[in-house]
Amino acid sequence: MSQKIYQVPDWAKRPVFREKQRLTPERLNRVHEHQMQRLRMTLLGVAGSGVVYGFRIGAEKGEKPEKQNQSGKQEHCGNGDGKLPVSCGLALDCFGRQLYWPGGALELDSLCGEPPTCAGSYTLSLHYAERRVSDEAGCGCKHEQTDWVEEGVVFTLSKGCCEAACGECPDNCCKDDTCLDACDYACGHTSSTNNCIKPDACLTNVCKDVPKLCDASCGDWFYDADHGIALGCVDICDLSEKSDKCGPQLGFCAAQPEVCHTRPYVYRNPLLYELIMGCQRDLPKVEALYWKKEKLTVTNSKTLMPWQQFSELINHANLFSIRFSKPIEIATLHPVSVLLTIFMQERRTDYWEGRRVPLLIEHQSPHNGFTQGITLKIADEWIDAEVNDTRSSLMDGSIAELTIRGAMLRDQCGNMLDAAPLDYTGKNYRQEMLGDDFVVAICVGALDNDKGGKNGGNGKQQSPKQLGRNQDA
């Protein structure tokens, strides 16, 4: 026994064609309507709404805006940059309809909706539109019935500008003690359940009928005035000359409009992959370490630096510098964020004890409060006591550790340091260490020049670990 569960919409009924069947306009149009509705719901459900590509607003770099008044006529009451170039683009509105613009220049007279009445900032929006046209007969007269439906777009201006929620999490109504996992979030986002996650507003339109285009007209175009896509924040100026007696003449200003933070976007799979990879982030890193203007090859592997080389490095510390990939705020580079620690092994229990080396930081070529390199300077008193003195505790071997606190550094964009090590060469996926500590450790060998001393007077250099096991209490 069959039971009628729900009323099937007309567009969901597709005709079945048979041999020698009479084709009616209703059946043929129903096939087209069925395909369009399925495509619309698929695009809306999978891709969402927003700009897919293009709609670059303003003149190209190096190109001067065209001088034109808003009417496009030679007789005018003032000169100005009246046109606004908009490049070719594709967008999807919140009903999944495709909005295609071949590119061109906009004037105030060519826009739909309420025209601006004063200078100021406005949001430029894109709307789906249709117009019906007929074929012309041989006599030059038009048929009484419409033969074609042209799908296009129209542009409108609305007073004021606002930013789109690009790259930000929605403002949900979850309580502090609410515990949600990925499935709970997806369930609420797709309106599969009533939890504290707000459903996506555009997805609710999947179950709604597309609004009719008979309420708003612009010439022979009918458009959806309530569901547009914001493209950018543009400025309207008075283009008339001060001595002009014709009154104010409004047109688009030549200033570059704000685009990136105004419009919503369709996050295609390749774009999502790039965002997950962090391609939008250009984080500052430690680019290289230099000594005597030559790049110092230091890795985090277990390598041993001879005492003589370490002694020379410390005695010429003013030649030791750190180079960053991007300018770093000088106020964040200080002895608390850049550290040099010496670890020495305690004789009785082999504990490693750390001692902070007193440092002075010199900024290289500072500009507007930022620098891309620093030079480390060590106090002369410390060098005399711990390196040049024959009773130095470092001569038994040590570990020198350079640490840069990535969480304390800031670049010109306010980003923290990416503490990826210098010897990292992985290319399979990004392994950013945002805000972590950049660490370079150098094992310094011992200087055994005490003939008949505690290490036997053999004159050989030993590693810190060997010293910790071999030296006497």
Image (tube, rainbow, N blue to C red):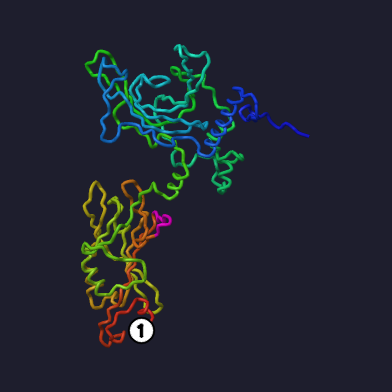
Q: Which residue lies at the image location 21% right of the left edge and 67% below the top edge?
A: 316
Residue positioned most to the right: 1
Q: Which image quadrant is residue 324 in?
A: bottom left
Report the residue that reaches farthest toward the bottom. Answer: 452
User: Residue 160 location in percent, x, y?
Assistant: 39, 27
| Magenta highlight range | 426-434
Identify the main secondary structure in magenta.
loop
Q: How far from the left and from the top, in percent, is residue 157? A: 40, 24
Give yes or no for residue 361 being in the magenta stretch: no
Asked which quadrant contains residue 457, the reply is bottom left
Horizontally, residue 54 falls left or right of residue 444, namely right
Q: Residue at x 43, y 28 (%)?
A: 126
In this rendering, position of residue 361 left or right of residue 103: left
Looking at the rendered structure, the secondary structure element under dot 1 is: loop
Quarter of the rendering occupied by the N terminus: top right
Instruction: Please state if 48 lies on the left or on the right of 31 as rendered.
Output: left
Q: Nearer the viewer, residue 53 or 180?
A: 53
* Disc 1 residue type (three-letter): Asp
Q: Considering only vertical position in the picture, is 183 above or below 286?
A: above
Q: Position of residue 168 (x, y in %)?
A: 45, 41
**Which is more toward the observer, 109 or 345?**
109
User: How many C-alpha atoms fall within 10 Å of the one at disc 1: few (<14), some, or many (≥20)?
Assistant: few
On the image, the x and y values in percent for residue 144 come to 52, 13
Q: Looking at the picture, does residue 168 appear above or below residue 142?
A: below
* Placement of 215 over or under 54, stated as above or below: above
Q: Which of 63 and 183 is in front in this view?
A: 63
What is the quadrant of residue 385 in the picture? bottom left
Give the residue pinned by disc 1: 472
Query: Total marks drawn?
Result: 1
Quarter of the C terminus within the rendering: bottom left
